[in-house]
Amino acid sequence: MSRLLVRAVGGPCLVQDAGRPGHAAIGVGASGAADRASYALGNRLLGNAVGAAALEVALGGIEVEADGVVWVCVTGAPTPLTLDGRAEPTGAVLALRPGRRLRLDLPPSGLRSYLAVRGGLDAPPLLGSRSRDTLADLGPAPVRAGDIVAVGDQVAARMLVDAVPPASYDDRPVLRVVRGPRDDWVADADRLVEQVWRVGAASDRVGLRLEGEPLTGRSPKGELPSEGALRGAIQVPPGGEPVVFGPDHPVTGGYPVVGVVVDADTDRLAQLRPGEELRFRWA
């Protein structure tokens, strides 16, 4: 069985797959790849089975070496790639021969790149998934320099395409949002779509913390009990600066949800860096 030897790691590098939905009743969230479209694209290019595990790499910095023939593809944030020092395009299917090293450097835009391998990554599954849930501390440990990552056998089809165009991201994206079930608990809910928000430094896979003119909360019916939560929900804590839930969000929350980002737009949230700006519009 071929393996990848991890020679260097920069930012967070996590094993992710399609997630473990259906376990909220026991307090376990779905987790999974933050940018699901980019993750799935890598698997399709390599002919992998749906749900094969890949590496989610934040802001590049990882270098891997093959100890056998390993076919790989990098999607998502267009990180500069070098194979034994030679530049390669993001989105291309590449063959790593034994001893060859692939390096992902800092992408000029976007946050998360996906390093997929033909056959997927062979990590121990938990509740049917190989995803790392950073909030619940479940799944494979973050990848570190010196780790050996085994390649699995989750192959479903031949490789038919050898490259796709690299991703590009617009400045200050405008994301669609529907009104939340508790928008009446926010006195000025419409200001969610009327101003520009900035991604805060404390943002992570649990949620994007937005900075801007705080929203004004109110309590029309006393204290709000905890309710079920989902990816894309926009909570308004007492300070008034919204938090948009990501893939590792808690399964319940007690702050009012003023809106919910349309599911198809949550992948774009996954590529926003701290300091970048965004806007919302009512869907």
Image (cartoon, grey):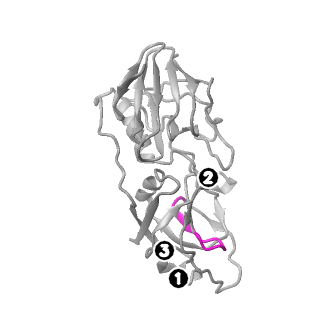
Task: State the residue at coordinates (57%, 50%).
Answer: 30
Residue at numbered disc 2: 29
Amino acid type of the residue tagged 2 in the rendering: Gly
Residue 94's place in the image compared with 138, above or below, is: above
Q: x, y (%) of residue 41?
A: 38, 40
Q: CA distance from mark 3 to mark 1?
A: 8 Å
Expressed as whole percent of the image width and height from the top left, the position of residue 152 reads 51, 25
Per the rendering, the mark at residue 102 is none
The segment highlighted magenta reads: 231-241
**Does residue 72 appear in this view?**
no
Pick whichever, 206 or 138, lies toward us.
Answer: 206
Q: Is residue 50 magenta?
A: no
Residue flagged by tag 1: what amino acid is it?
Asp
Provide the secondary structure element on which disc 2 rests. loop
The residue carrying mark 3 is 192
First-in-chain label (3 vs 2):
2
Residue drawn at point x = 57 percent, y = 23 percent: 7
Q: Position of residue 26 (x, y in %)?
A: 69, 53
From mark 3 to mark 2, how far is it between C-alphas? 26 Å
On screen, residue 272 versus residue 22, left or right, reads left
User: Considering depth in this image, is 207 or 260 the residue closer to the camera?
Assistant: 207
Q: Residue, x 57% and y 39% (percent of image)?
A: 11
Residue 3 visible, this orientation: yes
